[in-house]
Amino acid sequence: MDDLDRRLLSLLRANGREPIANLAHRLGVTRATVNARLRRLTDAGVIVGFSVRVRDPSEASAVRAIMLVAVEGRSTRDVIHELRGIPAIAALHTTNGKWDLVAELSCESLAAFDAALGAVRDIPGIRDSETSLLLSSATV
């Protein structure tokens, strides 16, 4: 994969439905070159599909956050079980390093977010946590 392929993929990440003629113009190459590159990247499995991303209308007003969680000793399984019972936790991941778990939170209001934080803090076995609100999202 060369620089042209990377630039093409970047344009497609921003708009997967961009017409071939526009892509060619923006990249300074012919439509045939863009078609050939797309075919090669698809055949090689680099591009696995094209899709449309739709914003959930309720997401615009949601309070979203990432919480890093450190667990005491060998209580990770019990902590995960308790965290799964908190509706505000949209996803939960194990990790390595200082933090043992990463939780993605989504709440309809700051009051609900505060309640979710309180529920997490009440879970036995959590040694420490750090939470960051997600202010905006950048497309990749």
Image (spheres, rainbow, N blue to C red):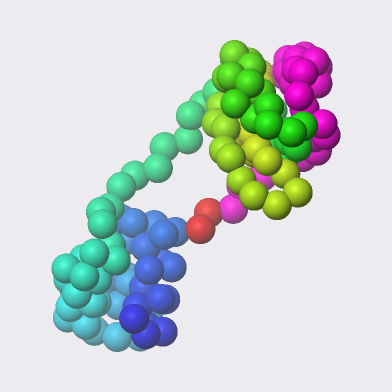
**Was residue 110 drawn as part of the magenta stretch in this picture?**
yes
Residue 115 sits in which quadrant? Answer: top right
Residue at figure coordinates x 25%, y 54% from the top left = 49
Taking depth in this image into account, of 26 and 49 the one nearest to the observer is 49
Residue at figure coordinates x 19%, y 74% from the top left = 40
Q: Give percent across and percent down for residue 59.
A: 57, 28
Q: How many marks?
A: 0
Residue 105 sits in which quadrant? Answer: top right
Q: State which quarter of the image contains the N terminus.
A: bottom left
Reply above or below: 137 against 19: above
Q: Give percent across and percent down for residue 83.
A: 63, 21
Reply above or below: 88 against 93: above
Magenta highlight range = 109-138
Residue at figure coordinates x 30%, y 47% from the top left = 51
Give the side of residue 50 with respect to residue 90, left or right: left
Residue 135 visible? The answer is no
**Was residue 16 drawn as part of the magenta stretch in this picture?**
no
Residue 74 visible? The answer is yes
Residue at figure coordinates x 83%, y 34% from the top left = 128
Reply above or below: 121 against 140: above
Give the side of residue 1 with respect to residue 118, left or right: left
Taking depth in this image into account, of 52 and 125 the one nearest to the observer is 125
